[in-house]
Every structure is written in structure tokens, then in C-alpha cells.
Amino acid sequence: MTRALLLFFTIVASKSLIASDSLASFDTTTTVPPVNIRLESNISSDSIHLDDTLTYTVKIIIEGDPNQYEIADFLPTTTNMKLVGSGSSNRSEAGSGVTLAIREYIFKYAPQTIGMAYIDPVRVTYTYRPTSTQGDLQSSRFSITVLEPHKRRASLPWYAWLIAGLILLGGAVAFVIVYKKKQRRTEEIVPETPPIEEILLEELKEAENARRVGDYSKFFAQLERILARYLSEKHSLDIKGLSREEIQQALIELDYPERIVKGITETLRASEIVRFGKGSVSEEELESSILTLRALLEKPREAKFEPDTENA
């Protein structure tokens, strides 16, 4: 009996050892993929015009060796948006003591109608190669407001540009012709320059012609040019930019008689009335303006030095 019990326990112990060895040979350690992969997504704007495009970016960020992961292809689902372009790129960055591998997917969309548009959540499937374990990454849903298209200036027809080009070309040719004529005039040798009074008296005749035909703006503009040139030539006085009161004071300081100062002042006042549309002037004022300038040019010495007979 004792020998039978001993034999029984020996057989049980042997079977236990065999079973233990058998179980050990089939034991496998399951490696869980580390949590070092994530997804980020964003859009370029949450509102766009109908004639603009929207950029949707999806980033898969992996800490460590990116070759341990296989990323499945994916395509976002949208509403009221049309895909017009896409692309992807890989890069690496260093951050917080680890290397980040970034796979960036870019999608370009054009809105179809005014209103709301949507980009549904993207589900990206990846496989962790060391254990062939699969996982999913998911983005958020985006809502986009589609606005009216930009207001754009209407483009001119081709013939309008052609006409504008011809006008510019004609203006350039005319400028060159006028410039050449002026250049030739300056190159001509003038044997003797007539006195400034004679030159301005001829211009005064042109002003009188403008008065006869009723072109009073041209009439007074010519008178102002005559006066400005005369004072510049005779006294090196530049009256451009001076007010009527400043010109009056300058004539007084140059010792012109009161009637000449008064006549020129009244001429400038009448010129302002006509040229700036403040009213009209009488024939007497027109005639007085001519007489004042003629007296200044024909008898400059008498005009300057003769006594004021009106106050005599």
C-alpha cells in the first residue's frame, strides 16, 4: 500500500512539471503601444467669402521613431465644400527633450453656396508595427460661415485699354514735339532781346482779344501773368503764392503811387471774382484793369514817380 501511494504521488508530480513546462513554452508578452501619437487639426478661418478658399490642416504627431507606425490614408467628408487641392509633408521638431515627427496633411476647399459649410470629424487609423496593434485618432467637427463674394471692380474691355494706350502715346509724342521746338528756340541765337515792357505789351494785346470774345477767365489769367513777370523782371519779386494783401503791401514798399497800387489791387480782386466764380465784373472794371497794366508798361517811370493826381 505504501509503495502504491508513493508511486501515485511521483506520477502526479511528474505530470505537474510537464504541464508547467508546456505552459511556459506558449506564454507571450503583449506589448501595448505607448501613448505617443496624437492628432491635431485646424482651419484657416471660420468664415470665408464665396470666392475664397479654405485651408484645412491635419497633423499626426509622433514622439520617437515614426517608422513604428503605419498611417492609413484618409479623406475628410465635407458639406457645401469642394476639394480643390491637397498635399502632405513630413518634418521633425525637437521639443521637451524628445523628437517629434510631424506628418502634415493639407486640404484646400472652395465653398459652393452662401450659408454654412461643414467639415466632419476625421477618423485616422494607425497600426503600431511592433505588435500589429491598431488604433484610431479623431479630429473635431468644424463649422464655416460662407459670406458673399468680394466686390471686384469691373474690368474694362480690351478696346478701352487700347484707346487709353493710344491717348497716352499721342500725349507722349506731342510732349516730345513741343519739347524739341522749345529746345530749338533756346538754341537759336537772338541778336537782341527787346525790353520786357515791349514783350508784355504784346501779351497785353492778347489779353484784350480774350476780353473782346468774352473769355474773361483767360483775360484775367493773362493780366496776372503779365504783372507777375513784370515784377519779377524789374524787382526780382516773386508774387506766386502771395495773397492780394501781400502783393499790395509789396507795391507800397516799392514806392509805387497809390493809384497804381489801387488799380492793381482792384485788378487782382476782379480776377478772383471771375476765375473762382464768385460773381461778375462790370465793363468799367475790365477797362480799368487794362488801363492800369498799360500805364505800368508804357510809362513805368511816370507810373512810378508821377504824383497821385487823384489826391492832389
Image (cartoon, helix red, strand yellow):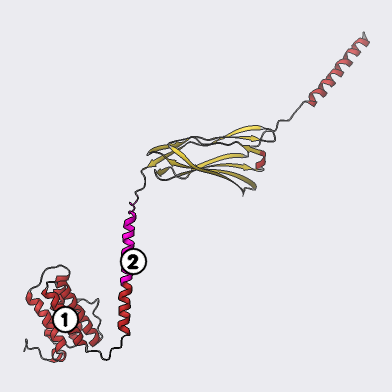
Compare residues 201 and 259 and report the one nearer the observer. 201
| Residue 110 vertical position relative to residue 202 in the rendered view, above or below | above
| Residue 143 vertical position relative to residue 312 in the rendered view, above or below | above
| Residue 254 vertical position relative to residue 169 in the rendered view, above or below | below
Q: Quadrant of residue 226?
A: bottom left
The kind of residue tagged 2 is: Leu
- Provide the residue span drawn in magenta: 152-174
Mark 2–mark 1 distance (CA, rounded to whole Å) = 35 Å
Q: Quadrant of residue 73?
A: top right
> Residue 169 vs residue 241: left or right?
right
Residue drawn at 65 percent across, 42 percent down: 66
Q: Which mark is residue 176?
A: none
Overall secondary structure of the magenta section: helix
Label 2 crowd (10 A; few <14 / some 14-19 / many >=20): few
The kind of residue tagged 1 is: Leu
| Residue 250 x %, y % | 20, 83
Who comes first in sequence, dot 2 or dot 1? 2
Q: Quadrant of residue 88?
A: top right
Label 1, on which residue?
Answer: 204
> Residue 175 vs residue 35: left or right?
left
Compare residues 261 and 112 and report the one nearer the observer. 112
| Residue 167 x %, y % | 31, 64
Dividing the image into 4 quarters, which one contains the N terminus? top right
User: Which of pointers 2 and 1 indicates the residue nearer the eye?
Assistant: 2
Label 2, on which residue?
Answer: 169
> Residue 28 vs residue 309: left or right?
right
| Residue 62 vertical position relative to residue 295 in the rendered view, above or below | above
| Residue 112 x %, y % | 41, 39
Compare residues 46 and 84 and report the one nearer the observer. 84
- Residue 262 visible (yes or no): no
